[in-house]
Image: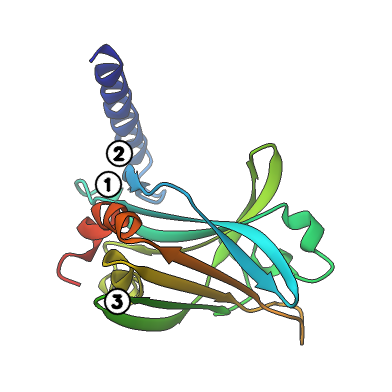
Amino acid sequence: MRDARGRGSKRVIRRWFCCLIVLSLPRIATCQAAATDSPDFDAVAQIGARAQPVRFHFSCSENDGPNLTGVLSVKLETLQYEQLRPVFNFDPFEGPDAHAGALSDLRSSGASGAAENRFTASGSAIEGNGAMAFALEIDASRREPGPLRKLAAVLRPLLDGPAKLVWHQGNAAKSAAPLIATLELSRTEAATLRDVLTPCMRGR
């Protein structure tokens, strides 16, 4: 109980600190609310004939007052991505101003149906398990109904397992092979994901 109270106190302190920054600097972007995160789901991607380990991660955070903005997101981490540079160009996807375009196609299917749409992903290099990975992320603010509805529609079939998500990531290098990552969820894994994402799905 002591550890749980300590963690809760730290979260409250961080939230108030974030709000104080927003109130004192009104021109900066609003803070992002603390997210409820899924466990990492390991999967495999194909780039041409090459198999590559990847990891999927999902999150949903709540709107909490005028200064904390909720976000729905799905992230694809390509492990040891430096080894893939000869066959996949990650550079145009890096940063919030990534200029690669809408090259991310998400296709989902589950017990409740199927959905597909195209998105623009932005990415960054991160450290994971002692090696560098490249994380591509698609997200939507909960204060922007259009983008949120679009992403929620594609993720909703994953909440009723068994389910599958295929992330078809076009290569920014002309005529080069895409990265195609496939995640398969059992009923139990889908139920775990449902607990995480349901707050972002209400009314969508």
Amino acid residing under circle 2: Leu
Determine the CA span between mark 2 and mark 3.
28 Å
Say if mark 2 contacts mark 1, CB within 8 Å.
yes
Horizontal arrangement in the rendering, residue 151 relative to residue 97 (left or right): left
Disc 3, SS: helix
Q: Is residue 151 visible?
A: yes
Write down the residue under mark 3: 146
Write down the residue under mark 1: 67
Determine the CA span between mark 2 and mark 1.
8 Å
Q: Please rate how many residues cluster around mark 1, counting C-alpha atoms within 10 Å: few if below 14, some from 14 to 19, many from 20.
A: some
According to the image, what is the colour scheme of the structure?
A: rainbow
Residue most extreme to the top:
2
The residue shown at (21%, 56%) is 199
Write down the residue under mark 2: 23
Amino acid residing under circle 1: Asn
Task: Indicate whether 164 appears above or below 186.
Answer: below
Query: Where does the image place residue 189, in percent across and percent down from the top left?
Result: 35, 55
Query: Where does the image place residue 27, in percent across and percent down from the top left?
Result: 39, 50
Amino acid residing under circle 3: Gly
Give the numbered dot on residue 125.
none
The residue shown at (44%, 71%) is 165
Mark closer to the chain start, 2 or 3: 2
Front disc: 2 or 3: 3
Q: Quadrant of the N terminus?
A: top left
Horizontal arrangement in the rendering, residue 158 relative to residue 75 (left or right): left
Task: Indicate whether 92 appears above or below 75.
Answer: below
Mark closer to the chain start, 3 or 1: 1
